[in-house]
Image: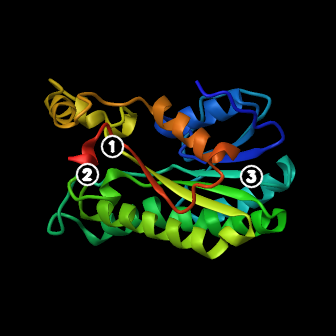
Amino acid sequence: MMAEDFSGQTVIVTGAASGIGLSQAKLFLENNATVVALDKNEIPLQNSNLYTLIGNVSDIPTFDKLRELIQKVSGKIDVVCNTAGVLDDYRNVIDTSVDQWNDTIQTDLTSQFLMIKTVLPIMLEQKHGVFVNMASIAGLVAGGGGVAYTAAKHAVIGMTKQLDIDYAGQGIRANCIAPGAIDTPMNAADFAGDGKMAKWVADETPAKRWATPDEVAELSLFLSSERSDYIHGSVVPIDGGWTAK
């Protein structure tokens, strides 16, 4: 485990009730950060440096509540992990309803935009801030999701690059992570029944295995630290070699 000291820093993590978001929240707390954890479900963590907000990242009123909480906690934000997201069942255009398209785009893309709009003014005033946005291998290649998920994750990458270009000179740093096969509750369907789909995914991954959420959290910690200060507007795959094929 990386040894970092985030004492005095405030970190926001969305999707913190399970999977990658939960692992990120735990790891930042272990490294002395104050964590503001956001999810629509109860967050199964207890820590004196943890502040939780139950809300849907797709809803604008959630971010009004977040602004209020930030002021109560510390009035500053050093790191944002935009992690919350949903899958789209690998549906193609014909099988994707307009409602599902809108919901996927809202949750996987617009929520990140809303978060950035909320905290960027605070970061600019501080002249420092880091965004770690959650993309996916579906943001780099086809086949990692359906049409809505793939479109949203491609857009996350573009948004992250533009964000960094626009504000890097003012102390802002934005990168995104592109996970491949990560064993999280969001991917539970792949392990259902005889786990045939999960085995196929592992077989098709050059590393021949699924990763754990903790591995993605470790990468998030590094990208949030001063050790990665010269990494800007980048997409970092963590996919066992999937996109190298």
Residue 15, given in percent of the width and then of the height, sits at 53, 45
Residue under numbered circle 3? 78
Q: Work out whether mark 2 precedes mark 1 in sequence or the reverse, and give the earlier one.
A: 2
Near mark 2 (Cα within 10 A), the count class, few <14, some 14-19 or many ≥20, is many
- Give yes or no for contact between labels 2 and 3 (Cβ–Cβ under 8 Å): no
Against 88, residue 182 (above or below) is: above
Q: Can residue 17 be spotted in the picture?
A: no
Distance Cα–Cα, label 2 vs label 1: 8 Å
The residue type indicated by label 2 comes to: Gly
Residue 239, given in percent of the width and then of the height, sits at 33, 41
Distance Cα–Cα, label 1 vs label 3: 27 Å
Q: How many marks?
A: 3
Residue 135, given in percent of the width and then of the height, sits at 42, 55
Near mark 1 (Cα within 10 A), the count class, few <14, some 14-19 or many ≥20, is many
The residue type indicated by label 1 comes to: Gly
Instruction: Kindly identify the residue that appears in the image at 45 percent across and 60 percent down.
Output: 107
Against 198, residue 14 (above or below) is: below
Q: Quadrant of the N terminus?
A: top right
Q: Work out whether mark 1 precedes mark 3 in sequence or the reverse, and give the earlier one.
A: 3
The answer to whether residue 51 is left or right of residue 84 is: right
- Give yes or no for contact between labels 2 and 1 (Cβ–Cβ under 8 Å): yes
Task: Give the numbered dot on residue 180.
Answer: 1
Mark 1 secondary-structure assignment: loop
In the rendered view, how is the structure colored?
A: rainbow
The answer to whether residue 8 is left or right of residue 55 is: right
Against 229, residue 94 (above or below) is: below
Residue under numbered circle 2? 144
Near mark 3 (Cα within 10 A), the count class, few <14, some 14-19 or many ≥20, is many
Q: Work out whether mark 2 precedes mark 3 in sequence or the reverse, and give the earlier one.
A: 3
